[in-house]
Image (spheres, coloured by chain):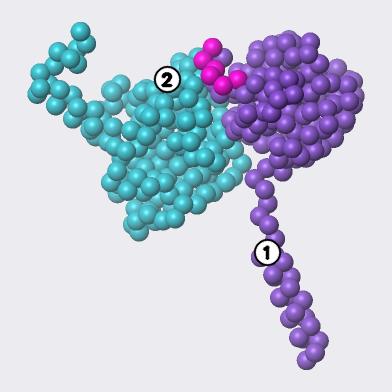
Amino acid sequence: MRHRKALLLVFTAAAACLLLAPAAPASALEIGSTAPDFQLTTLDGKPISLADATHTHKAVAVIFIATKCPYSNAYNTRMKDLAAAYEKQGVLFVGINSNKTEPEEEARAHARQHEHTFPIAKDPGNKVADLYDAKRTPEVFLVAPDGKVKYHGRIDDNSEDASKVTSPDLKNALDALLAGKPIQNAQTKAFGCTIKRV
Amino acid sequence: MHDQARLSGHGRFVLAALVVLRAAGVGPSASGSPSSISGELDSAGLRELLAAQKGRVVLVNFWATWCVPCREEFPDLVRLQRDLAPRGLRVLGISTDFTGQTAAVESFLTSTKPNFDNYRKKSGDDQAFIETVDRVWGGELPFSVLYGRDGRKVRVFSGRHPYEQYRAEIVKLLSEGNRQTGDARSPRS
């Protein structure tokens, strides 16, 4: 009898824990949280890690990209231009392709075709996408030298037409971060294709 | 001077009536056939289109020509419209293809000959458009939203779903009235 009571207590406590457990956050990476480190190999065959990149740069823009997604492709020129413009200010852009449907050779050809000079890496098994809880392409995580996420979301507010952008969110975030000012709009909604996970 | 401004009072009434009937799905499409794009929609246009549907159960499907699951799902939407329109359903398609893909959209509609109207999302206005459709929507396709007869959003479907699932949800709504908002998710583009 005593044994049954103890068992009942254990079950009750377990049920209470389940009920009281906080709901999972909408995004695993909140603004101000530490960006998980990753080690990948770029399409050029060079190793790249977030820890190394943040130690040597004033900011690192990690962008989940794709080769086949029209939303991501709409930003090819904008990503290239932003990466080139901010490289001079000590910012590194890192493209990560986590799509299982887009093999490395395809990603390499795509990068060549669109003249992407910033490092791009395949993310085998979408492990980095999982670590970041990245869901879409394009989706940006801007990381400061202290390893904290300072901006998360879209590149800007008009995927289709760069000439009609009214809110260049990533650029604004980069400018604020480099100037040591608070980022006004640190969290925006990334709109694009879903990452094709394994 | 615009043509509309030259219309008589009677002419303006007739034009307004035609616009309302058109938005409500009565009468021919603006283009004359659902096999072409019925128009472009921004967030305000989408709200107006939805407002004009009150009294019907509406399934709005967002798709794109480059989205394989969307193309695969399209015949099911045609079937839903065919089977359930007599009971009060209206299917509406909204292509999210970019302006440069308009020819591909037209070609797709010509080849599939849908029995429901299809619009194209207007360039820009992304955030407002998302908010109008559903806050949880992040651009994945296909994405469908089911509205009750009173215009209330009842359910969202992220990704492709089987015909039977859509049908069951819609039939329940047609026969029982509106239900609480829920969502259903599955692999998507």
Residue B112 visible in rendering: no
Q: Helix, strand or loop at disc 2?
A: helix
The answer to which of B136 and B158 lies nearer the viewer is: B136
Q: Please give the chain letter of the residue carrying mark 1.
A: A
Chain colored purple: A
Chain B, hue in figure:
cyan
Q: Position of residue A61 (x, y in %)?
A: 75, 24
Q: Is residue A54 shown above or below B73?
A: above
Name the image quarter holding residue B61.
Answer: top left
Same subunit, tags 2 and 1: no
Most foreground residue, A187 or B16:
A187
- How would you rate the neighbour count of disc 1 (Cα within 10 Å): few for under 14, some for 14-19, many for 20 or more? few
**Residue B20, horizontal then vertical, whole percent:** 23, 32
Q: Is residue A107 left or right of residue B39?
A: right
* Marked residue chain, label 2: B
Residue B38 placement (x, y as % from top left): 35, 24
- Magenta segment range? A163-168
Q: Main secondary structure of the magenta part?
A: loop
| Tag shown at residue A20 | 1
Quadrant occupied by the N terminus of chain B: top left
Name the residue at the top extreme: B1
Q: Are marks 2 and 1 in contact (CB under 8 Å)?
A: no
Residue at which label 2 appears: B106
Closest to the observer, A154 or A70? A154
Q: Residue at x 37, y 34 (%)?
A: B47
